[in-house]
Image: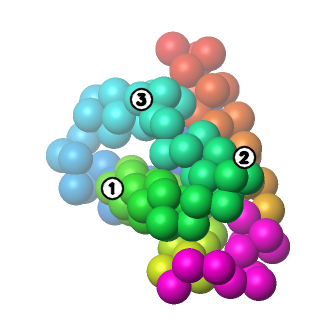
Amino acid sequence: MTLKECYAAIDGDYAGVVTRFQGERLVMKFALKFLNDKSYETLRTSLQEEKYEDAFRAAHTLKGVCQNLGFSKLLSSSDALTEALRGGVNPDVPELFERVKADYEETCAAVGALQAGN
């Protein structure tokens, strides 16, 4: 899978991120590092333990990483979850987290395919 195909698979902002990073080389480097980012795991664990302030910080970090990398779909879902967690407990959090989980898994699968092709 090429970098452009990876971004297409996850509804990412390929053109924007390549422009911002001034070429594919750095985009590739940081996209592959995404697989080692611990924000999602911290988010999942914090929600399980009902540590909503920690979950908010993790969701906010994940959102920022996605914004920098142009992962638009995961950015959108993590943004919605971040805002729901901003005030602590919120009845929408479980449903919003499921959306983040699905988008995260899709993103990791695409980036994993990108990594396998390199």
Could you say where residue 30 lies in the image, as x and y percent from the top left? 35, 34
Name the quadrant containing residue 5. top right
Image mark count: 3
Name the quadrant containing residue 31. top left
Disc number for residue 78: none
Q: How far apart are marks 1 and 3 (CA)?
A: 12 Å
Q: Distance between the residues labelled 2 and 3?
A: 16 Å
Name the quadrant containing residue 101. bottom right
Q: Which residue has dot 1 on it?
A: 68
Where are the magenta residues, as a range?
87-97
Q: Is residue 21 visible?
A: yes
**Of marks 2 and 3, which one's residue comes earlier in the chain?**
3
Q: Which residue has dot 3 on it?
A: 33
Q: Is residue 89 in the magenta section? A: yes
Front residue of this view, candidates 12 and 97: 97
Front residue of this view, candidates 87 and 66: 87
Other-residue count near label 2 (Cα within 10 Å), few / some / many at <14 / 14–19 / ≥20: some
Could you say where residue 45 lies in the image, as x and y percent from the top left? 65, 45
Q: In this view, does 55 lie above or below 29?
A: below
In what element is the residue under mark 1?
A: helix
Amino acid of disc 2: Glu
**Of marks 1 and 3, which one's residue comes earlier in the chain?**
3
Q: In this view, does 48 lie to the left or right of 6?
A: right
Amino acid of disc 3: Lys
Q: How far apart are marks 1 and 2 (CA)?
A: 18 Å
Could you say where residue 19 lies in the image, as x and y percent from the top left? 25, 55
Front residue of this view, candidates 26 and 93: 93
Other-residue count near label 1 (Cα within 10 Å), few / some / many at <14 / 14–19 / ≥20: some
Amino acid of disc 1: Asn
Q: Which residue has dot 2 on it?
A: 106
